[in-house]
Every structure is written in C-alpha cells, then in structure tokens.
Image (spheres, rainbow, N blue to C red):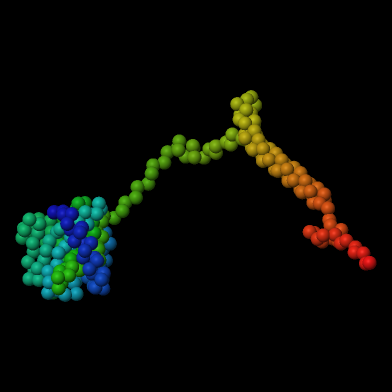
Amino acid sequence: MARSPALLLLLSLGLCCTGAQGQRNTMEARFLNRNMKHPQEGQRLELECRPFNSDNGVSWIRQDKDGKLHFIVYISPLSRTTFPQNERTSSQFEGSKQGSSFRLVVKNFKAQDQGTYFCIANINQMLYFSSGQPAFFPATTTAAPTTAAATTQSSHVNKDICMPSSEPGTSSENILNLYCEIFIWAPLAGVCLVLLVALIVTIVLCQKTRRRRCRCKRPPNGKPGAKPCVPTRHI
C-alpha cells in the first residue's frame, strides 16, 4: 500500500474547499453492515461511500494511527479500479460501483489495515471528502495481577513521623518529634515577633505625631495665618 506526504496536503486543501462550499457533510464513508462497530482480525470488511454526484469517480484512502495517509484504490464511474502502481487488481482490496454506491472491500482485515477510512470525490474541479469511518480492533483490557504481598503492603498505614510512638526505647522517633515541633513553632514565634515589633513602631509614631500637633501655637484671633489686631488711637 502506497503512502505519500502529498496526500496530507491534498486532504487539507480538500477540507478547506469543502468547508467553504458547505458540502463537507454530503458524503459519508461507513460500514456496509451498519450493526458493526469493530472489525475482527481475518474478517471480510466492506465499506461504502455515497457521494452527492455519482457521475464522478471516488478514491479511497486510509489514515493510520500515526496520521499517515495511504492511497488504496480509485474507482471510476464505470466501476474500473486503479490500485497503487497503476495495478488493476489487489490481493488485499476490492473496489466496485453498485448504483450510486462506491464500495471498498478488505478481503482479510489485519492489524496493518486498522485506521480511519475516507472517500474522496473530484466534482467540478473541487475535492470533496467524506466523514471518516474508524476501523480498529476492539479494545482489550487486562487486569493487573495482584499478589498477597501487595495486598498486605497496601493494608499497612504509614505512620506520621510527628506522632509519638507507643513502643519504648524509640529515641530516633523522639528526636524526629522534637524537630517537628521546632519546625512548627519556630516560624509561628517569628511571625508573632514581627507583628509585635510592627505594633510598637506604630504606637511610637502615633505618639510623636500627636506631640508635634500639640506644640503648634494658635494665633490670637483663632484663625491661622491672620495678623493680630492693633488698636488705633483717635486724636
């Protein structure tokens, strides 16, 4: 199966063009069996694509898990197929046109066939892309093995090093407890000391401000900046 970086550019240009024309959702790639959700390995997988204009040919491509695009087959309006390297047949795929439906058949679905399948139609010199049809194996979940030792370890609760131990003679734990108390109370004491100093400084500044205001002399008439009145003599 051929892969080409140019297909990625082709896909991007096609999506832009179809979005501008409002025709992006008029094509749909889907499983022929609509009840299918996940193909099985070795199964015969059939997909169909119904473009809004079946007078033009359709190409099938696949996008793998890594985002790479792979050209599969081109189906002409006369149901003629062209595979990579201009081959007319393929040992893994089949292509045909039945009415207005362009069908792709994966003869023996394998792991390398997983991906998202698209069909492309060139109509009036405009590329139209279908919605993608994911085709992946069913997801399998494996339960992690559990052992008795793991269960026993998970049942134990780690002791807090700051909690006193009930066992006698544990001098190392007592030292750890002392360190814990120092780490807890030392920052608290420092914060309290800083607040106390700030409070003292605030009180001292307030007292100095009051003293400066009290020392200011008032003028005789009670109005600041006014000159005192001088009595005049009448001759």
> Residue 92: x, y in percent?
12, 56
Look at the image and tell me in which quarter the N terminus lies. Answer: bottom left
Report if residue 31 is visible in the image.
Answer: no
Question: Where 43 falls versus 17 (above or below)?
Answer: above
Based on the displayed image, in which of its 4 quarters is residue 102 positioned?
bottom left
Question: Where 96 falls versus 155 (above or below)?
Answer: below
Question: Where 50 falls versus 209 (above or below)?
Answer: below
> Residue 29: x, y in percent?
22, 66
Q: Residue furthest toward the right? A: 235
In the image: residue 129, left or right of residue 232: left
Q: Residue at x 14, y 59 (%)?
A: 72
The foreground one among 56 and 49 is 56
> Residue 168: x, y in percent?
65, 26
Based on the displayed image, in which of its 4 quarters is residue 108 positioned?
bottom left
The foreground one among 144 and 30 is 30
The foreground one among 221 and 33 is 221
Question: Where 181 falls versus 231 (above or below)?
Answer: above
Based on the displayed image, in which of its 4 quarters is residue 165 positioned?
top right
> Residue 134: x, y in percent?
26, 60
